[in-house]
Image (cartoon, coloured by chain):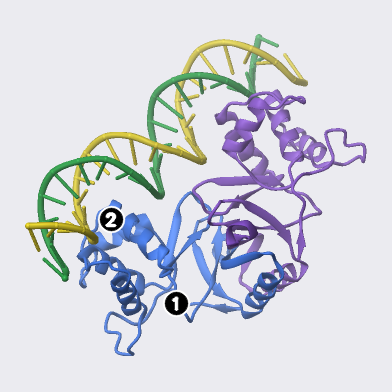
Chain colours: A purple, B blue, C yellow, D green
DNA sequence: GTAGGTGCAAAGCTTTTGCAGCGGG
DNA sequence: CCCGCTGCAAAAGCTTTGCACCTAC
């Protein structure tokens, strides 16, 4: 198991050539979407995150962040998230708590989530062995598996103490 | 992987001695709850199911079923489900679709779910190897794992055809 | 008789939809 | 210029809460 740091360390520079934001922008263009300030702002925010955000968190962050961000209406957030999900650029994560979370779908860094039922914190983790089990399982079933989610519920180190 | 039949084949007789409904009733009594018709009806319904039901499905089924069932108000359904979940007698299953599902937490027959994103059908499955992976994972993390959920998204055999 | 259980209706939340106006191409 | 993108506000769902009545004990 590989615990994962809390924040992405790269910023909007994308000097390495192929960050997720670029891929997303290109994919939207190819799909026939026009550019839009709200969408660009939302994509930049998602690109900076290591883990899933809820629509409310996105709205709040965009409302207060400088750095090229701009406030985006809630309706636009949901509409944009819907488009991005349809293009498989983001993944919807349901951790239970009555709200959906969304995160950039990157080729590397696939992970799942632990949710503390006491304080609500969501912690990402990776586990290759678990992935293997799911791959093998996917081959055995009479069902076409496109995505998979694993959620561990319990208490985080802090709440357990 | 073991696919699972669609309906439970035992009924309210429970001649085998320790069905889930009995355990649930006992646990509620020990926790200091009084008996109540709505709760009994809901427990009997959950005991008869092989897979998770939504609150709406529960309300509808109890409203039309004979066999000892009686209509139960939606508010009562949610309140009772909350009590049962707090006592770990049922498990809340989030498959994404904006609604929660609930199923009896049995010692045997632990399973997970495949959700067809086309038609919405929820199919249960068991996979011991997957369980092993999760057990091993749970031991490695600095997090106390109480429950785990695995959801496979994709298309069912029918929608894939 | 008292405290908990239940039903009904209203409120709360997240998410979706309608519509008017702005803005990209 | 036209059509898509956005914001605002209203609506739609699922779920929760308040309150009065009923019921187990």
Checking the image for residue B76, the label placed there is: 2
Helix or strand or loop: what does disc 2 sit on?
helix
**Disc 2 to disc 1, C-alpha distance:** 23 Å
The residue at 64%/24% (across/down) is: A71
Is residue D15 rendered to the left or right of residue B153? left
Q: Position of residue A89 (x, y in %)?
A: 72, 44
Location of the C terminus of chain B by quadrant is bottom right
Helix or strand or loop: what does disc 1 sit on?
loop
Q: Residues within 10 Å of mark 2 (few under 14, many from 20)?
A: some
Q: Position of residue D20 (x, y in %)?
A: 13, 43
- A96, B34: nearer the viewer: B34
The residue at 48%/81% (across/down) is: B108
The residue at 87%/33% (across/down) is: A13
- B7, A114: nearer the viewer: A114
- Asked whether the residues under the numbered discs 2 and 1 touch, taking CB atoms below 8 Å apart as contact, a structural biologist would say no
Residue tagged by mark 1?
Answer: B106
Q: Residues within 10 Å of mark 1 (few under 14, many from 20)?
A: some
- A90, B24: nearer the viewer: B24
Residue A105 to residue A27: above or below? below
């Amino acid at each position: 198991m590989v615990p994962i740091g809390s924040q992405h360390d790269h910023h909007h520079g994308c000097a390495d050539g192929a960050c997720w934001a670029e891929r997303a922008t290109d994919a939207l263009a190819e799909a026939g979407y026009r550019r839009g300030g709200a969408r660009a702002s939302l994509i930049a925010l998602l690109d900076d995150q290591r883990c899933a955000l809820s629509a409310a968190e996105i709205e709040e962050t965009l409302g207060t962040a400088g750095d090229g961000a701009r406030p985006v209406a809630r309706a636009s957030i949901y509409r944009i998230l819907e488009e991005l999900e349809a293009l498989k650029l983001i993944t919807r994560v349901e951790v239970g708590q009555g709200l959906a979370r969304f995160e950039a779908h990157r080729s590397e860094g696939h992970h799942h989530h632990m949710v503390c039922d006491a304080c609500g914190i969501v912690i990402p983790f990776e586990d290759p062995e678990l992935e293997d089990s799911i791959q093998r399982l996917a081959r055995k079933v009479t069902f076409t598996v496109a995505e998979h989610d694993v959620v561990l519920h319990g208490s985080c180190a802090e709440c357990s103490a």
